[in-house]
Amino acid sequence: MSIFKPLGYITFAISIVQFGLLAYSQEAVRLGTPISEGQLAEFDLIATPDGSGFPEGSGTAREGKAVYDTRCAACHAATGEGISGRTVIAGGDMQSEETPLRTVGSYWPYASTIFDFVRRAMPADAPKSLSNEEVYQVTAYVLYLNGIIQEDTLINADSLNAIKMPNADGFIDRSHIQ
């Protein structure tokens, strides 16, 4: 009797055991729960530059300061100067001789992007926790910190798209390039 025949049986037996363990582990581990239609709708909160996707609500920078101070300043500091290079949201100059500082005011081409980002991703420790009113208020405050609007300018779905960002004409959309 060849030694290879028993080895073949052993290999076959090991394969059966491995398959059984794999099947058991896939059946035994049940991560999460199925998502409901209501929960799925919360993922589709995109507000686009063309004005679609904005909820009801409004706010001014004066109102937004209170929300910013309690929910945003821990990362973005008191006046948007940030606590690290990645958290700076005010200032910057895309025309500088040195490496440009890309901030909301110096780089982003649309004011609607601020609203959309804050609504879906901020604050970083509790995304989507701000009400629509608070998002409008914080958006207004960030625009104010960047000198783009006045403190009492009312921001809403209509007025947000009318705001001309400083780098709107300097932004090159390369999303179509792969």
Image (cartoon, rainbow, N blue to C red):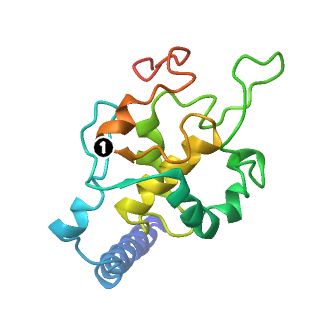
Figure check: 69 above or below 45: below
Occupied quadrant, residue 51: top left
Q: Helix, strand or loop at disc 1? A: helix
Q: Please state which amino acid type lies under the numbered disc 1.
A: Ala
In front: 150, or 161?
Answer: 150
The structure residue drawn at horizontal position 32% and vertical position 85%, both measured from the top left corner, is 28
Single out the residue that lies furthest toward the bottom. Answer: 28
For the N terminus, the image quarter is: bottom left
Figure check: 42 above or below 94: below
Occupied quadrant, residue 21: bottom left
In front: 137, or 82?
Answer: 137
Image coords of residue 119 (percent x, y): 42, 55
Single out the residue that lies furthest toward the right. Answer: 98
On the picture, is 44 further left or further right than 70? Answer: left
In front: 102, or 140?
Answer: 140
Q: Is residue 124 visible?
A: no
Single out the residue that lies furthest toward the front. Answer: 152
On the picture, is 118 further left or further right than 94? Answer: left
Residue that badge 1 annotates: 157
The structure residue drawn at horizontal position 46% and vertical position 19%, both measured from the top left corner, is 173
Image coords of residue 43 (percent x, y): 30, 57
The structure residue drawn at horizontal position 61% and vertical position 34%, both measured from the top left corner, is 105
Q: Is residue 88 visible?
A: yes
